[in-house]
Amino acid sequence: MLDRLREVAVRPQRFGPPARLPGDVRVSVSRVDGWPVYVVEPRATASGQHVVYVHGGSWAFEISPFHWRLIAVVVRDSGATVTVPIYPLTPTGTAATVVPVVADLVSDLVDQHGADHVTVMGDSAGGQVALSTALLLRDRGVPPLRRTVLISPALDLSLSNPEIDRVEPTDPWLARPGIRVSIDLWRDSLDLDDPRVSPLAGDPAGLGPITVFGGSRDITHPDIRLLVDRARAAGVDVDDQDGPGMVHVWPLLPIPEGRTARAHIVDLLRG
């Protein structure tokens, strides 16, 4: 994993959307705090709903065509406008520097459109950033967002849940030794139990509704089960989309279950 991280650090990765996105969407880009920030919106009438999508990739790899296709489907089918920050990756980007800027982007949309028209969404490492952002906004006094949508989120970067020992042999993609390298770069000087690093360490009370997708063949799954229980105990409305037999980030994949999950996200943004 360390060799891969060194390679991508010296070879800039492409992050722009594919030349042709599915659906009738329009893409623009600007810079915010030095970051490229894309806005994907419908060419037809927009619904007035706004989403900030934070991509995954172990905090070290750029947004992929799978992410862009999901974003385009959400825009096309829901009418929402999706803002996509291309945040700095490790080792330049860290939890302490990235999470507050994502929170600023979301807060600006709340100021413009109202919290009930703003959703934050992310997958994997981006799911960690999304939930950490929601917690930070709550602590700043921002009203609860319309929804936080989490796809196979990384929730406790200590990776200390004993249930991971049972799940890890069934996970075809993720293993703790490689992930720990990325985690150490991402957290930098922050403690592992800092909510900007491990949102499961934060108190979920006062958050808006959460939708979380998890798969039983994914080492993030045990912590997702803890999040569901803790958030519900704190009075948070949790839409638990558990996928028996599913792997990491299955809602992004070109499989029947992935299509059903994407349709569910669209329905949430329409409803």
Image (tube, grey):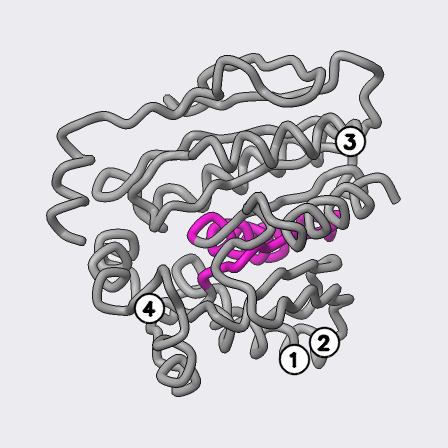
- How much space separates mark 3 and mark 2, taking CA atoms? 30 Å
Residue 97 among magenta residues = no
Tag shown at residue 100: none
Identify the element where label 3 is drawn: helix
- How much space separates mark 4 and mark 3, taking CA atoms? 38 Å
Q: Residue farthest to the front?
A: 256
- Mark nearest the camera among 4 and 1 is 1
Image-based side of 15 in relation to 74, left or right: left
Q: Identify the residue position indicated by label 3 in the image.
A: 77
Name the residue type under label 4.
Leu
Q: Identify the residue position indicated by label 4 in the image.
A: 192
Identify the element where label 2 is drawn: helix
Q: Is residue 259 visible?
A: yes
Name the residue type under label 2.
Arg
| Label 1 with label 2: CB-CB less than 8 Å | yes
| Label 4 with label 1: CB-CB less than 8 Å | no
Residue 90: image location, x then y, percent: 25, 43
Q: Identify the residue position indicated by label 2 in the image.
A: 232
Please tell me which of labels 4 and 1 falls first in the chain: 4
Depth order, front residue of 179/92: 179
Other residues around mark 2 within 10 Å, as few (<14) / some (14–19) / many (≥20): some
Please tell me which of labels 4 and 2 falls first in the chain: 4
Point out the image quarter for the C terminus: top right
Q: Is residue 140 visible?
A: no
Residue 236: image location, x then y, percent: 74, 68
Count the numbered circles shown.
4
Name the residue type under label 3.
Asp
Other residues around mark 1 within 10 Å, as few (<14) / some (14–19) / many (≥20): some
- Mark nearest the camera among 1 and 3 is 3
Tag shown at residue 229: 1
Name the residue type under label 1.
Asp
Image-based side of 57 in relation to 269, left or right: left
